[in-house]
Amino acid sequence: MPELPEVETVRKTLKKLVLHKTIDQVTIHWPKIIKNPVEVEQFIDALKGETIVDVGRRGKFLIIYTETFALVSHLRMEGRYGLHPGDEPYDKHTHVIFHFTDGTELRYRDVRKFGTMHLYKKGDEFNYPPLIALGPEPFSEEFTVEYLTEKLRKTNRKVKPALLDQNLLVGLGNIYVDEALFRAGIHPERIASSLTEPEITGLHREIVATLSEAVKKGGSTIRSYVNSQGEIGMFQLELYAYGRQGEECKRCGRPLEKIKVGGRGTHFCPNCQKV
Ligand code: ZN
């Protein structure tokens, strides 16, 4: 699943591709992707004639803004956007097509069909699911050491599942949570409320640093990540923990291990991240 850095890369490239384009028609081949409004006809009618004025992001959600509406889109496992000439053929995995007045099309392709789209009047998007309950952005002023301390102290969960909870903090997924915990020297199975003040300070610092380095590099290449311009494998973030089980720890040289924490494959160094 794309994490904050990957979604940020998609946002930037998508914005370059579709800004100022006007929607002439919308075709929907798999209505279940549209979660709001309930009637897909309303979704289609609302967007006809609208011009795209911005593409934003909240956590792992993209927000495509037109003059009147906010389209909140989550790519989940396999969702991809691409801009194509209208006469180019498309396959059975293309579920939503935004036809522009200039003859090009923004196509949403999703092999597993887990992606979602919610359309709201602009300004309402933050007052309803899926954005309403989200925690702070990692680069925002709200995400302070004090905030993280308060949230972690209140939970009896292990630290990894706590950090994956998008209501606590948005943006971290399985890759970057393993990286941040490695860099902070914290075992992923530690009970969140047992973390000391210096540990939380270090964790806060490493979450922000890991994500901002990844954003600068355009997201990781794990799972053959392709951005919305079809660029693949052009970014390389140096990973310390994720996917490196059995390989030498870059800090101490001992082999990294992989375990399951909260049902998720978790990579860590048993020497550098003690229980
Ligand atoms: Zn180590």
Image (tube, grey):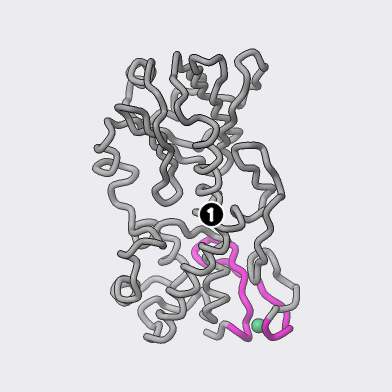
Q: Is residue 161 above or below residue 257?
A: above
Residue 274, position in %: x, y?
Answer: 55, 85
What's under tag 1, amino acid-wise?
Pro
Residue 188, position in %: x, y?
Answer: 51, 74
Residue 107, position in %: x, y?
Answer: 56, 26
The residue under label 1 is: 5
Image check: 272 left or right of 193?
A: right
Residue depicted at x 45% and y 27%: 20
Image check: 24 left or right of 215?
A: left
**Residue range of the region highlighted in magenta in the rendering:** 251-272
Q: Is residue 150 above or below residue 61?
A: below
Residue 152, position in %: x, y?
Answer: 35, 73
Instruction: Using a 10 Å C-alpha cutoff, classify the residue at mark 1 as few (fewer than 14 neighbours), some (14 to 19) or many (20 or more).
Output: many
Residue depicted at x 60% and y 15%: 86
Is 110 in front, or is 161? 110
Q: Is residue 94 above or below residue 141?
A: above
Residue 144, by quadrant, is bottom left
The answer to whether the residue bearing label 1 lies less than 8 angstroms from the nearest atom of ligand 1 is no
Residue 84 in the magenta stretch? The answer is no
Judged from the image, the secondary structure of the residue bearing numbered disc 1 is helix
Image check: 116 left or right of 226?
A: left
Residue 269 in the magenta stretch? The answer is yes
Residue depicted at x 47% and y 31%: 19
Residue depicted at x 50% and y 73%: 206
Q: Is residue 241 above or below residue 104?
A: below
Q: How many marks?
A: 1
Q: Which quadrant of the frame does ligand 1 lie within? A: bottom right
